[in-house]
Amino acid sequence: MKKLLFIFCFLICANAFSQILSSSVEKKTIALGEVNHIVITINNLNNEKVSAARENELLPFHFEEIKDSIAQTQDVYYRRIEFAVFDEGKFTIPELEFKVNGKVLKTIPYEIDVINTAQKTDQINDIMKNKEVKLEATDYWELYKFYILAAIAVICLIIAVIMFIKFGRKPKDSPVVATNQTLKELDSLKKKKYVETGNYRSFYVELIDISRKFIAKQYRVPADVLLTDDLIDVMKKNNTISQENEKIVEEVFLRGDLVKFAKTFPDQTTMEKDFADIRDFVKRSSKDLEFENLRKDA
């Protein structure tokens, strides 16, 4: 008898100090879009913290949470969620879990029946008749000004791109670009002071190499792979290069071959003249191309 009394007292004490979860749903049947709510209460917290899903994330899909209110004191956790369902049918609110000091408490599941209360025969009446409003030019401007400004901006951008492509950008292989690049290379060669130090072999090797690359790029002649005699023969047959420029290239290239094989030893004056002649030839090359273009057009 004493043992039964002890067990009974123990159960009463345990129940008195354990957490008690309760839940309720206002309506089990609702109309489409009608607001319903569920309330969850946990008692006897004894200052314990309650862990659960964050606000507006407790209910599953189909349940549109409108408002999620949470309040907690030392002994009570209270949560009230207003929700609506916008699909017709039966939907279930499953067991919702809450953790208190490592212990998991669960609500009971609820089945919600969502019905469409509208009837096909229902007549929909406007609250008031439509009123015709006459719009003026300023009204149309206010309505469509952003579209008009956007269209103008697009047109201006297209024009700017066309102008840039047509006038603002020169091809990298244009005669002017090739000429300027070669003149820079010749200036770099001059700064090496091969002429002043008498290093004639290095001077002519680099001078002819620069000239060959320029002729290949400017006149579309394979000067970088042809031997000097073959290059001279091609230039004479090609009417693109003027006779004055052909003569300069022929003299300098032939002298360069003799220097390369140590058959001649030019002095400083000759080296300076050959450098100046090649430089003038590069500058005049654009006139050769202009004449060739006019001849083709004719």
Image (spheres, rainbow, N blue to C red):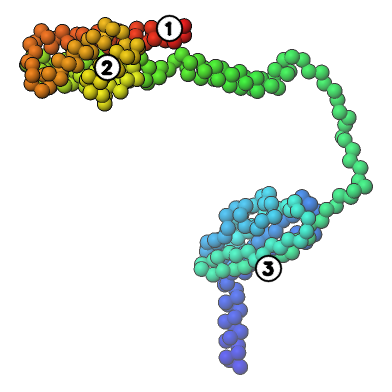
What kind of residue is marked 3? Ile
Label 2 CA crowd tier, 10 Å (few <14, some 14–19, many 20+) = few
The residue under the point 74% across, 14% down is 137
**Numbered tag placed on residue 112 in the rendering:** none
The residue under the point 65% across, 23% down is 147
The residue under the point 75% across, 51% down is 86
Q: Which residue is mark 1?
A: 294
Residue 131, compared with residue 72, is above or below; it is above
Image coords of residue 106 (percent x, y):
62, 68
Q: Identify the residue at the far bottom of this view.
A: 1
Q: Which quarter of the figure is the N terminus placed in?
A: bottom right
Q: Which residue is mark 2?
A: 233
What kind of residue is marked 1? Leu
> Would residue 253 be found to the left or right of residue 283 on screen?
left
Label 2: element kind: helix
Q: Which of the 4 image quadrants contains residue 180?
A: top left
Residue 10, compared with residue 44, is above or below; it is below
Image coords of residue 22 (percent x, y):
66, 66
Label 1: element kind: helix
- Report the front residue among 233 and 47: 233
- Report the front residue among 282 and 3: 282
Label 3 CA crowd tier, 10 Å (few <14, some 14–19, many 20+) = few
Q: Which of the 4 image quadrants contains residue 187?
A: top left
Q: Which residue is mark 3?
A: 108
Q: Earlier in the sequence, mark 1 or mark 2?
A: 2
> Would residue 278 be found to the left or right of residue 133 on screen?
left
- Report the front residue among 205 and 183: 205
For the question of whether residue 157 can be seen, the reply is: yes
Label 1 CA crowd tier, 10 Å (few <14, some 14–19, many 20+) = few
Image coords of residue 139 (percent x, y):
73, 18
